[in-house]
Amino acid sequence: MSIIRHDWTAEEISDIYNKPLLQLIMEAGNMHSQYHKPGEVQISSLLSIKTGGCSEDCSYCPQAARFHTDIKVQALMKTDEVVKAAENAKAGGASRFCMGAAWREVRDNRDFDRVLDMVKAVTAMDMEVCCTLGMLTESQAQKLADAGLYAYNHNIDTSAEHYEQIITTRKYEDRLNTLEHVRNAGISVCSGGIIGLGETDEDRIGMLLTLSNLPKHPESVPINALVPVKGTPLADNKRVPFDELVRMVATARIVMPASAVRLSAGRLEMSIAEQALCFLAGANSIFAGDKLLTTPNPEFNEDMEMFRILGLTPKAAFADKLVMQ
């Protein structure tokens, strides 16, 4: 089994990233088989429990209050509504249920108390519960851990160098600080990024460099392709060609071999054959359901048909016994 490293250089990751695509896919597939069960894919469901009205200026996000999009602001959902959604997701095959709130940061108030109740309720259903709520303090991360939260998502989005071109309302270090708080609380870390933000290949390599050189790799690394939304500053960006998404998946798999690599936003535009290349390259997690927060996504039944065709097996909740290093 290959050694998990935390001392990658940009040059090393660049050499991997720029290999001929089929060679890269084969090498990533070989690495994947050392740490994971081939053909086993985790199914996650993502629900927006509080939509729109965010004070951030993330250039890709239709939920930013300052952008004129078709997103309607919705208050925090009721706990019983969230539980019902989780039940439906579990019935559809999901083993992880992710709850997202359009907040810049978590505040210690009644809304956060309700989120803690949601975490407790869904955890009791024997599902892995993940939240993405914005920035966290150490004490807030601990409260989530005490409520039973399994994972926390906080993407770094892009490289440190490109970050200020995409977001100005918080710093790159703020992202990393939240990841540290999550890790210190004993919560599984979910952190990846987005391609298609106008970044260079060097920025993509830089993002993977940051993640792969963390003291402990994220247990889950989402690789998203930008879904341009009318009304956002990046509305006119071109969609990322699927081969570039495959290349990112494969490189992430090689430099973070024990992590789950999640094929996230952008799947709706991909054929089954294109997604199959991502699975061969080491992707072993997807979001299923008709929406990723506010952007379209394949329906559960479409994904189940893809699983049948490709011979994929849904991963059970809490099945990952690997010790991340």
Image (tube, helix red, strand yellow):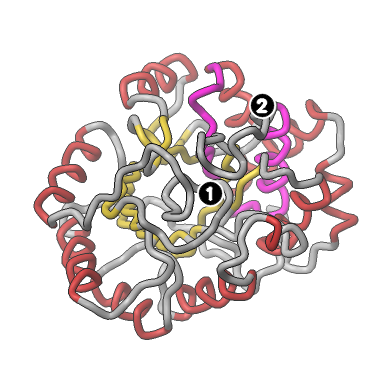
Number of marks in picture: 2
Mark 1: amino acid: Ala
- In the figure, residue 109 lies in which quadrant? bottom left
- At horizontal 86% and vertical 30% (from top left) the residue drawn is 20
Quarter residue 162 falls in: bottom right
User: What residue is pinned by disc 2?
Assistant: 242
Q: Which residue is outermost to the left? A: 80
Residue 249 included in the magenta stretch of the image: yes
Residue 142 % position (x, y) = 34, 80
Describe residue 269's horizontal placement relative to residue 211 as left or right.
left
Q: Earlier in the sequence, mark 1 or mark 2?
A: 2
Q: Nearer the viewer, mark 1 or mark 2?
A: 2
The residue carrying pointer 2 sits among few (fewer than 14), some (14 to 19) or many (20 or more) residues within 10 Å by Cα, namely some
Q: Is residue 304 shown left or right of residue 175?
A: left
Which of the 4 quarters of the picture holds residue 325?
Answer: bottom right
* Disc 1: which residue: 260
Q: Nearer the viewer, residue 154 or 199?
A: 199
Q: Are marks 1 and 2 in contact (CB under 8 Å)?
A: no
Query: Is residue 310 on the magenta stretch?
Result: no
Q: Pinpoint residue 27: horizontal percent, then vertical percent.
A: 76, 37
Q: Amino acid at mark 2?
A: Phe
Q: Point out the stretch of residues depicted in magenta.
A: 242-271
Could you say where residue 107 lies in the image, as x and y percent from the top left?
32, 77
What separation in Å lies between label 1 and label 2 (alpha carbons)? 20 Å
- Dot 1 surroundings within 10 Å: few (below 14), some, or many (20 or more)? many
